[in-house]
Amino acid sequence: MICLLPLEQWIIQKRREFHKYPELSFNEHMTQKRIINSLKEFDLESSPIADTGVIADITGSGPGPCIAIRSDTDALPIQEERTAYNSEYISCHNGVMHACGHDGHMAIVLGVARMLFEKRHEFPGKVRLIFQPAEEQYPGGAKKVIDDGGLAGVDAIIGLHIFGDIDVGDVRFCPGPLMANSNDFSIRIKGKGGHVSTPEHCINPLEMAADLISRSRLESAMKVDPSRHVFGFGMVTGGARTNIIPDDVHISGSYRTFDEMDTVTIRNVLDTILISIMEKYAREDIVGVPSYELDVVHGYPVLVNDPVFTSAASKLLKQLFTKVDDNASPIFGSEDFAYYLRQIPGMFLFLGTYDPKKDIIESNHSSSFDIDESILMQGVQILCSIALDFLNKPGEYIH
């Protein structure tokens, strides 16, 4: 084993290395090597999983349950802006950036690995470390980890996410739904094109698209409480010149909910509106149009924290930290950690990094996003504390 820096310095160094050399989803090859080599620094062996991920087990002093701790590893296709802080670790990869905190997540879980490896004679059971690729891109890396046996023998799982719009050091979570599902839709509306000077010979798909856009938000809100969903259009494409009515228009957008039935309801609202628009614009003298095609791609499911596990973790964290909100409002962001929680009990929590005194104020996915590195050790302490408490008192966490 090589001589290591003190833990906090070590994880800050690791975080900056990951930040400097980001890689996109499903392409985290060098990141994978850095994780494996980092674990080797204190003699912890690991294995690849999910193609570009890493898995490692820390075995305790005797028989007991197994808890998994997960970090995501991928970056985003964003060009990083130079700031007052990042001159030493700004991304070296053009158009790629760790703009969502995954560099911090990897550093935290490496810190957890080092701390628990040193304490392995003091706890029963096993800790599994999962460094998961491709959280940022459907279908996500979590499914691949599960398919590759990453949860085999695991009794519970915990994960953490750094957020730029939560005050630095604040810990937030709640039992039950914490993050929404994600659903992307694309619609093709087909009409009949022609010259704008003779609209009587045409069925204008742009006008039908305008009807759809103006009605959808209102009518979805009539069916599903606005506090339980978000709905929006992100792209409209169609037409080539100002004096030509196009034959068709493509529209795409997204909606998110905390309940699968609400997801179905909003899909039905879209269908109902489109059918009524087709009827409104239909003409007896033009056959076969208007028509539409609606395709919905369901992304990650609702992330649901196990109530029993979350209650036990909440009691522990409130004893250790001053700023713990265990009844936080769910957010409309989505996470493929939800797939793990569909398999085994556990929880996901948020750790804030918003720090206006240090001018660290950007939200996740900003080209100027950065983190207050003081929270890295806090993240290590949070995850280690829950893991050790679970291993010593599993009956308080799971049925």
Image (cartoon, helix red, strand yellow):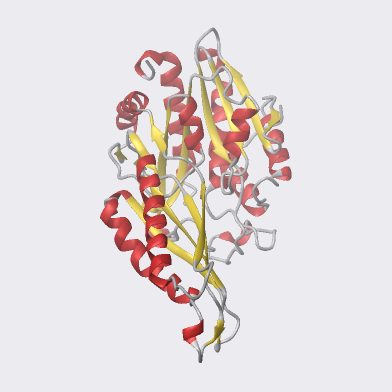
Residue 255 picture quarter: bottom left
**Toward the viewer: 117 or 164?**
164
For the point 65% across and 52% down, which residue is it? 22
* Callout count: 0
| 196 relative position to 329: left or right | right
What percent of the width, then of the height, locates residue 93? 69, 59
Q: The C terminus lies in which quarter of the figure?
A: top left
**Toward the viewer: 367 or 208?**
208
| On screen, residue 385 above or below 265 | above
For the point 52% across and 13% down, which residue is it? 125
| On screen, residue 255 above or below 123 | below
For the point 38% across and 32% down, which residue is it? 305
**Toward the viewer: 248 or 43?**
248
What percent of the width, then of the height, locates residue 230? 36, 55
For the point 64% across and 26% down, which residue is it? 56
Q: The N terminus lies in which quarter of the figure?
A: top right
Residue 361 picture quarter: bottom left
What percent of the width, then of the height, locates residue 41? 69, 31
| On screen, residue 173 above or below 355 | above
Residue 347 picture quarter: top left
Residue 256 seen in render: yes
Q: Residue furthest front?
A: 285
Q: Residue furthest bottom?
A: 197
Residue 355 seen in render: no
What percent of the width, then of the height, locates residue 167? 35, 51
